[in-house]
Image: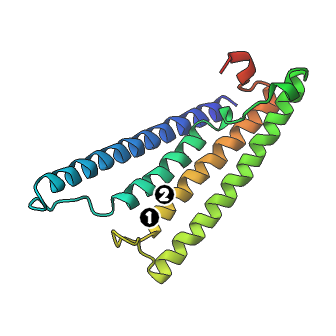
Amino acid sequence: MAFLIKLSNSISRLCQFIGGISLIIIVLVTIIDVVTRYVFKLTGGEFGFTVKGSVEIVSYFMLFALLAAFAAFVERSQIIVDVFTQKMPQSIKGYLMGTFMIGFFLVGIVFAWGLYESAIDALEHGNMTQDLRISMMPIFLVSAFLSVLLAIRSLIESINIFKTGEFFDAEETGA
């Protein structure tokens, strides 16, 4: 069990890193795009450098950031409504959380399978992004990889919850 927990924590750190890098890229592209557009406006069109495909870059890296964050913090992703759970024993809450984790495992598998099929389809048919004209295949593969990491973490967390009965409880932490 200790190996699985260590693996889950390693995957979480990897996903946090990927999500952090994605957010940094989003911010940098947005800042550069705004600055170059402002310089273009100030110079009356003399300075014609702009970031091509900035909307695509931001949208695809936002996809990576969201999938990575979901995988990194899946055990904390439940919104608990106090009205329904405040009187429940911890064992029932743990059972519900373990069941939710199995659901996230299934969601991760479905996402990964669909994105993998989309990557194969993009490779076979030559699907390209609209502005940048790059293949959609690597975008789909990175998304599928992050979805696999979500599935793995969800499965490990559900096994841990069912085996130990311990789970992240936002009610107790005040989060």
- Crowd band around label 1 with a 10 angstrom C-alpha radius: few (<14), some (14–19), many (20+): some
Which quadrant of the structure image shows residue 44? bottom left
Which quadrant of the structure image shows residue 9? top right
Check residue 93 in the rendering and tell me which mark sits there, or answer none. Answer: none
* Relative depth, front residue between 25 and 16: 25
Left or right: 65 in relation to 168: left
- Crowd band around label 2 with a 10 angstrom C-alpha radius: few (<14), some (14–19), many (20+): some
Q: Amino acid at mark 2?
A: Val
Q: Amino acid at mark 1?
A: Pro
- Image spot of residue 141 (x, y percent): 50, 62
Q: What residue lies at 22% left-to-right and 59% top-to-bottom?
A: 50
- Image spot of residue 53 (x, y percent): 33, 63
Residue under label 2, please give it: 142
**Scheme of image coloration:** rainbow
Quick one: quadrant of the C terminus? top right
Residue under label 1, please give it: 138
* Relative depth, front residue between 129 and 165: 129
Left or right: 173 in relation to 137: right
- Image spot of residue 1 (x, y percent): 70, 31
Q: What residue lies at 74% left-to-right and 53% top-to-bottom?
A: 106
Callout 2: SS = helix
Left or right: 107 in relation to 141: right
The correct choice, above or below, for 162 with respect to 110 in the image is above
Task: Check if mark 1's residue and mark 2's residue have beta carbons within 8 Å.
Answer: yes
- Image spot of residue 113 (x, y percent): 64, 64
Left or right: 138 in relation to 82: left
Callout 1: SS = helix
The correct choice, above or below, for 173 with respect to 2 in the image is above
Q: What residue lies at 77% left-to-right and 31% top-to-bottom?
A: 161
